[in-house]
Image (spheres, rainbow, N blue to C red):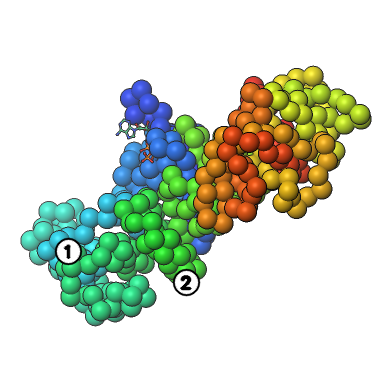
Amino acid sequence: MAGVTLRNLTKAFKNVIAVKNVNLEIHDKEFLVLVGPSGCGKTTALRMIAGLEEVTEGEIYIGDRLVNDVSPKDRDIAMVFQNYALYPHMTVYENMAFGLKLRRTLKPGKSPVAAALLGWLVPRAFYDFIPKDEIRRRVEATSKMLGLDGRLNRKPKELSGGERQRVALGRAIVREPKVFLMDEPLSNLDAKLRVQTRAELIKLHRRLGITTIYVTHDQVEAMTMGDRIAVMNDGVIQQVDTPLNLYNHPANRFVAGFIGSPAMNFVDALVEPRDGGLYFKADGFSVKAPSEKADALAPYTGKHVVLGIRPEDIFDKTMCPIAVTPDNTVEAVVDVIEPMGDRSHLSLRVGGTSLIANVDAETSAQEDSKLPVVFDMSKSHAFDKDTDRAIY
Ligand code: ATP
């Protein structure tokens, strides 16, 4: 087993800098999710770790070994891609065994030059191969673990999408790598199978304990799977932390808006001192900042900031679990109600401000009617308007 360290990693394609000076330490046995919007550089970062993309600047270590100049096959990694092309003419068994059959190591005492010249003619004179029994043992054990033991003689076209996906995983597992690299491996599956396979992957990781770097653009996948999550935007790592810390303490506005669904509401507001406290004065309403955050907010008195409040921290006043005061209550107008089953998403308007609330489905809200709502200000966030960094 091994951790992975990225130091000042940069990748430039002609005029595009896809990855900018990334520093990241992925611990041994950790499941780290690299998440970000399309084009933010996550696949490029993963491909550099795999050795499929040359590094422009910086260093990649697998364990203690600098691997910048090590070929992909010698990095002791296994990759699972979104398009997990299986060989259509091979059975499940053959697909899983294929990579192992090809794997060879130079026999002790043999010259690499001679092997390169003559190895294609008499490979067994120069290389050791994995014994057939060992290949069978690994494929059988892995297929059993993945629930594929009854499918070993089938061809890929005779499998469901989820089963094919598991064969691709199995093909990676039998290699017994030090590190798994996964690039959106679930995105070809339908919604139900995705959730199921997500859970299977988590269980598998707990069982095998292999360091895993998992790329996705889906924040739900990131939140549910990652021991830690690295949020990336525009080639730059924005924050690395546990899922809950990212949700509760986003370091900047990008992370705050990316993690959580529906996304956090952002409201332009003036920080105003009143009655010994600080208030956020926005278009159409005013709410009081939590007193324990007053120190952090004080330097912004008289200035505009961005108030952040998550939809799930806005309540219908008639069914509100927190104390209702004039300082946290806002008179809104309901534009649209989207019933989600146990919850409803409300599109609200307050003066010139638009907000989304995620409330209990039993809400008394009616479209085109007024609805007093309550902000749980203890869960609020504030961001610097110029730098987008979190003030609290
Ligand atoms: P997605 O989720 O859409 O796959 P991503 O976050 O994985 O996106 P990358 O594929 O890493 O993003 O791409 C990062 C940036 O680098 C993009 O602007 C992309 O257009 C650019 N890029 C990627 N590969 C190349 C290439 N071979 N040549 C030029 N530019 C490239």
As drawn, which residue projects farthest toward the left?
Answer: 121
Kindly tell me whether residue 134 is visible in this rendering.
Answer: no
As drawn, which residue projects farthest toward the right?
Answer: 276
Q: Residue at x 15, y 61 (%)?
A: 88
Q: The disc labelled 1 sits on which kind of residue?
A: Lys
Q: In the rendered structure, are the residues bearing label 2 and label 1 in contact, judged by CB atoms less than 8 Å apart?
A: no
Residue 370 appears at what percent x and percent y? 67, 35
Element under disc 2: helix
User: Is 99 or 34 nearer to us in this picture?
Assistant: 34
Q: Residues within 10 Å of mark 1 (few under 14, many from 20)?
A: few
The C terminus lies in which quarter of the figure?
top right
Q: Which residue is mark 2?
A: 207
Q: Is residue 141 above or below residue 175?
A: below
**Ligand 1 shown in quarter:** top left
Q: Which residue is mark 1?
A: 157
In the rendered structure, which disc, 2 or 1, sits on the residue that comes first in sequence?
Answer: 1
